[in-house]
Image (tube, rainbow, N blue to C red):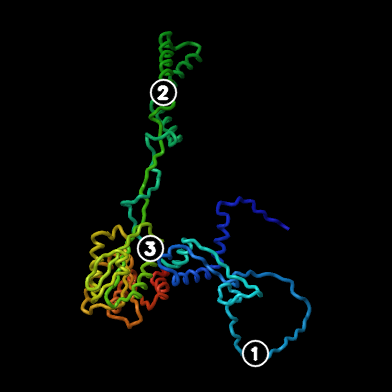
Amino acid sequence: MAYVVDRRLNSKNKSLVNRQRFLKRYHEQIREAVSDAVSRRNITDMQRGDSITIPKRDISEPVFRHGQGGQRDIVHPGNKEFVQGDRIQRPPAGGGGGSGSGEASDSGEGEDDFVFQISQAEFLEYLFEDLALPNMVKRQLAGSDAFETHRAGFSEVGNPNQINIVRTMRSAQARRIALSGKARRRRREVLAELAEENDEEESKLNEAERLALEEELSRLNFRLNTVPFLDDFDLKYNLHIRVPKPSPKAVMFCVMDVSGSMTQDIKETAKRFFFLLYLFLQKNYEQIEVVFIRHHTQAQEVDEETFFYSRETGGTVVSSALSLMSDIIHERYSPDEWNIYGAQASDGDNWQEDNQRCHKALVDGILPHVQYFTYIEIGDRDPQGLWHLYQHLERDYADRFAIQRVRDNSEIYPVFRELFKKTMVID
């Protein structure tokens, strides 16, 4: 029998591996719990984590037991209450779920459901799983406050701790060769002549020539010895420069009808959709700006409080909001620098003669510049004229324009997933 002993030291987050394994095992239960949390929680609490409850039966582990051997004959008694085909009524609440409304009792034992906490990052990961932002391509360097250090070759100046020894020694050797090459060759020649003179029996050189060679050799040695092994000129330093780190930037336009037909319930439904989109963009971009545009017969840019809670009356002219959005894009958010997203919510009402102006504003001023534009029509009425107009645009701009209908708050999350679901790309 072989034994495996794990002697690896526990890291700081020693239970992290087990946690990830647990989340993977109960992925479907956690995902369902997160979906339920979207419908029951307040919008302002959507960004924090959540307590996830998993039924006890779902986390039970299989066990092995010794069964009874041999053959057994068992007779089950009948009963007076049920016959074949009867449906047994569900037991009363409070029996063992831990969250029922039954009365207290001094007998019986139950098992609570398993409850654990997931972090904000894990909550958002499950919330936006299998979703993707289309056309997420632009990057902006200007105004970035994040930098990365990159190697940029070598420099003649620097700190001692940045010295590059290999480059320094290579430079020193090249300098010594350049300064002493001619002298070394001449010294070799002089040494060869003196050696040849000493080997021969009869001297070819007179005393004066011999002394001249020895004196030249002495000068050459002195010259070579004065060439320094290492000079300040040879020092080479590693050069590092700070390069702005690309940070994706996005702007989100929230466009909503606030005419008399838009009730507060419809606005709350739209608010949930806008907030989901904001969280989704925040997960993918580091810098996000939000522009709120409200309209009835006229459009104006407002703050969030006014956008959702200010009451207005009057008719509906959607083109005023779309034209204002187009103007803001051209004035403040260059498509070359910003990823632009638009989200429009309405009950579908619009002045009939305004539909053509809406088409022109979208085709000429908005859709060529945005990454994605979504429209949700809230209510259970039949599709209005604005919906039919947007249906034609959806067919023409399928890669960046999408529309959906929503009846109440419970449909916001499924509709949001449908709008931003990942699409398979087949070559």
Is there CB contact under 8 Å for labels 2 and 3? no
170 vs 357, left or right, is right
Q: Is residue 301 above or below residue 104?
A: above
- Circles 1 and 3: CB atoms closer than 8 Å: no
Q: Classify the position of the N terminus by image quarter.
A: bottom right
In the image, what residue type sits under mark 3? Answer: Leu
Q: Position of residue 398 (x, y in %)?
A: 33, 72
Judging depth in this view, the residue of 360 and 186 nearest the camera is 360
Labelled pair 1, 2 in contact (Cβ < 8 Å): no
Residue 227, numbered label: 2
Count of numbered labels shown in the rendering? 3
Q: What's the residue at 25%, 63% (across, down)?
A: 328
Amino acid type, residue under disc 2 in the picture: Val
The residue furthest right is 70
Find residue 163 and report its image quarter.
Answer: top left
Q: Which residue is mark 3?
A: 281
Mark 1 surroundings within 10 Å by alpha-carbon count, few (fewer than 14), some (14 through 19), many (20 or more): few
The residues tagged by marks 1 and 2 sit, at their Cα atoms, a distance apart of: 112 Å
Density class for disc 2 (Cα within 10 Å; few <14, some 14-19, many ≥20) is some
332 displayed left or right of 126: left
Which badge, 1 or 3, is on the more N-terminal residue? Answer: 1
Q: Position of residue 392 (x, y in %)?
A: 29, 77
Q: Earlier in the sequence, mark 2 or mark 3?
A: 2
Q: Amino acid at mark 1?
A: Phe
| As drawn, 98 above or below 339 | below
Question: Dividing the image into 4 quarters, which one contains the C terminus?
Answer: bottom left
| Residue highlighted by disc 1 | 82
**Element on which disc 3 rests:** helix
Separation (CA) of disc 2 from disc 3: 65 Å
> Who's the residue at 39% across and 77% down the image?
408
Q: Nearer the viewer, mark 1 or mark 2?
A: 1
